[in-house]
Image: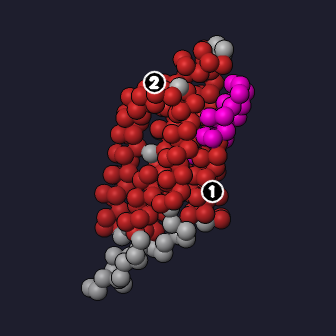
Amino acid sequence: MQRAPRRAGGARVVLAAGWTSILAPLAASFLLVALPDLQRSLSVDGVAAGTAVTAYFVLMVVGQPVGGRLGDRFGRARVLRAGTVLLALASVLGALAPDFQLVLVARVTQAMAGSLAFPNAFALIRNAVPASRRGRVMGGLGASVVIAGAVAIPLGQLIVHAGGWRATFVATAALALLAAALQPSSEPRLALDAA
């Protein structure tokens, strides 16, 4: 059986999808560890500050099916990039927020952006990786999300110690911009193992 030629750029798609997929747990955990500093800085009580975390998680869960449908309709690469750029912009907004209300707007926008980017990052893998390797790649990406969630807590603490709660938004913006730079400009064709 003759193997079909593999489209170039599959490794880049996997790298971009992997980098993008770790943004959601990083953004979630960064602010979680930054909450005490945010509360002191903006004079917000614990219950109100907790809504920034809760709103993020709820909207990420509820929004992902919508993000996936938008990717099906408008193109996964396009929606992935739009979500990642929106995440960077929302993070800049959070870093510059003068009050908690704007921080909450930034968090809601981050969650909406993540809902666009996260499902489409994984969807692109289906078209970039041959079926024989797809399970291993998807497993590796899933593991990277779990590892990012674990690493995000101590990394977030270091960021807060160095620059306060605003620095967590700056770090998320920088990581999102890097992810956007890695992302493909067009959707790869379906990679088949054999003709």
Marks counted in the figure total: 2
Q: Which quarter of the rendering shows the C terminus?
A: bottom left
- Sequence-earlier tag: 1 or 2: 1
Question: Are the residues tagged 1 and 2 within 8 Å (C-beta)?
Answer: no
Q: Point out residue 25 in the picture as x, y percentages from the top left corner.
A: 47, 38
Q: What residue type is labelled 2?
A: His
| Numbered mark located on residue 161 in the image | 2
Q: Residues within 10 Å of mark 2 (few under 14, many from 20)?
A: few
Label the magenta part by its dominant secondary structure. helix
Q: Please give the name of the residue rendered at 68% of the width and 31% of the height, measured from the top-left corner.
A: 97
* Residue 32 seen in the current view: no
Quick one: SS at disc 1?
A: helix
Q: Please give the name of the residue rendered at 49% of the width and 54% of the height, measured from the top-left corner.
A: 179
Q: Point out residue 160 in the picture as x, y percentages from the top left corner.
A: 48, 26
Indicate whether residue 95 is drawn in magenta. yes
Indicate whether residue 98 is drawn in magenta. yes
> Which residue bears the numbered disc 1?
82
Magenta extent = 91-114
